[in-house]
Image (cartoon, rainbow, N blue to C red):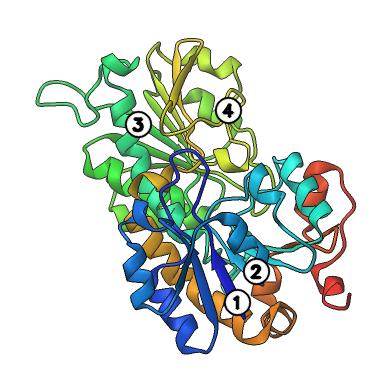
C-alpha cells in the first residue's frame, strides 16, 4: 500500500501523523511511504529522518492526496484538504464529526472511507487512540489554567497552590476519566484544592484510593456543581461521549456563581465543548471572556507539546496503521471489531450512529459498509 502523510495545516498544529519510526515499520513490511516536505519539523523530525527510515519526500499536499491509498494525519482534514480527497481513498485521523456538519458533508461528498481515531475501541471498552492525547490534554489543563489565572491574562491573579498563610485555588474537574484523572494528578501536584465530579461510583472509589484522600470526589449532578463552595476558581471540563457531541454540563447562568477572573478550561472543545459558553480557540489566541469568566478552549491542546504528543500518538496508532496497510481496511476491520468501531464514513454514508444522530443524518451500521 502507498501511505501518505501530509503536513498539518490547522493553525498552530505542530504534530505529524507518522513518526520516522512508524515509516520505517511500514517500509520494512513492504509498503511505500511518502511524507510532505517539512511535515515533521514541528515535532522535531527532519526530512532526512524520514529518508533514513525509507520514506520518500514530496513537495505538496496535492502530491500526497493524488497518489496515496491511505492518508494518515493527526487533525481532521481542513477544507483545502477535503477538496483533495477522492473516492475509495482511506483517511486515518482524528475526525470529531459530531459538531462539524461541514466536514461531514465534505467527507460524504468525496466518497472516501474515513476511520476516526477517537472511536476506535479496545476490549476493555476504552478508546486507545484517544487516550494518549487525553492524557496529554489532561496534564496540560492545570498548566494552561494556571497561566490563564494570572492577572495579566485576565484571570483572578491567584497562584494555584497558594503559599503559607494563603489558601490555594479551588479546582473543579468535571469527569473523572482519562482527562480528568490526568488533570487531577497535575492539579494536586501543584497544590490546588481539587474536587472531581463523576457519575461512576467505581471510578470515584478508584480516584479516592489512588489519590489517598488528597482530592475530593463528588457525584456529578447539576445541583452538586451549583452547590460547590464559591468561587470555583477553575473548572476543567473533561466529560465526553465517544463520537458524539460533548454534553453541556455548565450553563451560562452558572457563570454568575463564579468570581470575576475565574477560569474555565474546556478539554472537550473538539467535540463541541461541555460548557454552554465554549467556542473553539487556537494557541495563537487561546482565551476569551464571558460574563467576567475567562475561557481557555483550544481545540488542539496537545499540539502545544508536539514532540511528546506525536510520539505518544504514534505508539498507539502504529498497530492499527499496520493492520490497515497489511490487510486493507475491509479485512482489517472484519478481523478487528474494535477497529471497525472507528469507521465513521464510507462511500457517501455515515457509518457511526452517534454522528448521524448529532447531525440529523441517516447512518448505516459499520458492518454493513464492509459488504459494499
Q: Position of residue 39 (x, y in %)?
A: 43, 57
Are the residues flagged by discs 2 and 1 in contact, CB closer than 8 Å? yes
Examine the image and state in which quarter residue 330 appears.
bottom right
Measure the alpha-carbon separation of dots 3 and 2.
Answer: 43 Å
Q: Position of residue 57 (x, y in %)?
A: 45, 67
Residue that numbered label 3 is attached to:
145
In this rendering, would 280 be left or right of 307?
right
Q: Earlier in the sequence, mark 3 or mark 1?
A: 1
Are the residues flagged by discs 3 and 4 in contact, CB closer than 8 Å? no
- Residue that appears at 36% across and 51% down: 42
Farthest front residue in view? 59
Q: Which mark is residue 279?
A: 4
Q: Earlier in the sequence, mark 1 or mark 4?
A: 1
User: Which of the two marks, 3 or 1, is nearer to us in this view?
Assistant: 1
Residue that numbered label 1 is attached to:
2
Are the residues flagged by discs 3 and 1 in contact, CB closer than 8 Å? no
- Residue that appears at 55% across and 52% down: 200
- Of helix, strand and loop, which one carries label 3? helix
Measure the alpha-carbon separation of dots 4 and 2.
Answer: 36 Å
Residue that numbered label 2 is attached to:
67
- Of helix, strand and loop, which one carries label 2? helix
Crowd rating for badge 3 (residues with CA inside 10 Å; few <14, some 14–19, many 20+): many
Q: Nearer the viewer, residue 10 or 303?
A: 10
Are the residues flagged by discs 3 and 2 in contact, CB closer than 8 Å? no
Amino acid at each position: 500500500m502507498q501511505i501518505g502523510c501530509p503536513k498539518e495545516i490547522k493553525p498552530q498544529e505542530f504534530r505529524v501523523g507518522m513518526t520516522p519510526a512508524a515509516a520505517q515499520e511500514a517500509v520494512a513490511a513492504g509498503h511505500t511511504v511518502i511524507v510532505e516536505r517539512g511535515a515533521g519539523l514541528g515535532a522535531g523530525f527532519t526530512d532526512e529522518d524520514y529518508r533514513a527510515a525509507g520514506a520518500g519526500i514530496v513537495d505538496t499536499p496535492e502530491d500526497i492526496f493524488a497518489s496515496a491509498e491511505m492518508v494518515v494525519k493527526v487533525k481532521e482534514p481542513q477544507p483545502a484538504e477535503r477538496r483533495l480527497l477522492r473516492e475509495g481513498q482511506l483517511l486515518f485521523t482524528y475526525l470529531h464529526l459530531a459538531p462539524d456538519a461541514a466536514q461531514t458533508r465534505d467527507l460524504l461528498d468525496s466518497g472516501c472511507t474515513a476511520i476516526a481515531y477517537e472511536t476506535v475501541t479496545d476490549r476493555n471498552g476504552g478508546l486507545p487512540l484517544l487516550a494518549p492525547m487525553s492524557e496529554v490534554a489532561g496534564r496540560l489543563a492545570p498548566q494552561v489554567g494556571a497561566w490563564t489565572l494570572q492577572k495579566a491574562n485576565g484571570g483572578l491573579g491567584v497562584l494555584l497552590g497558594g503559599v503559607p498563610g494563603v489558601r490555594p485555588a479551588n479546582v473543579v474537574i468535571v469527569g473523572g476519566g482519562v482527562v480528568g484523572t490526568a488533570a487531577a494528578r497535575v492539579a494536586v501536584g501543584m497544590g490546588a484544592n481539587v474536587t472531581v465530579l463523576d457519575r461512576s461510583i467505581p471510578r470515584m472509589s478508584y480516584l479516592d484510593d489512588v489519590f489517598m484522600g488528597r482530592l475530593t470526589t463528588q457525584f456529578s449532578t447539576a445541583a452538586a456543581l451549583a452547590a460547590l463552595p464559591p468561587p470555583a476558581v477553575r473548572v476543567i471540563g473533561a466529560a465526553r461521549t465517544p463520537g458524539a457531541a460533548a454534553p453541556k454540563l455548565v450553563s451560562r447562568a452558572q457563570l454568575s456563581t463564579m468570581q470575576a477572573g475565574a477560569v474555565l478550561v474546556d478539554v472537550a472543545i473538539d467535540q463541541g465543548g461541555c460548557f454552554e459558553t465554549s467556542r473553539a480557540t487556537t494557541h495563537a489566541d487561546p482565551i476569551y471572556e464571558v460574563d467576567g469568566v475567562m475561557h481557555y478552549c483550544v481545540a488542539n491542546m496537545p499540539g502545544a507539546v508536539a514532540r511528546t504528543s506525536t510520539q505518544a500518538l504514534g505508539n498507539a496508532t502504529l498497530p492499527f496503521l499496520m493492520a490497515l496497510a497489511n490487510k486493507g481496511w475491509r479485512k482489517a476491520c472484519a478481523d478487528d471489531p474494535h477497529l471497525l468501531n472507528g469507521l465513521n464514513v464510507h462511500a457517501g454514508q455515515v457509518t457511526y450512529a452517534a454522528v448521524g444522530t448529532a447531525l440529523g443524518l441517516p447512518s448505516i451500521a459499520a458492518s454493513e459498509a464492509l459488504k459494499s
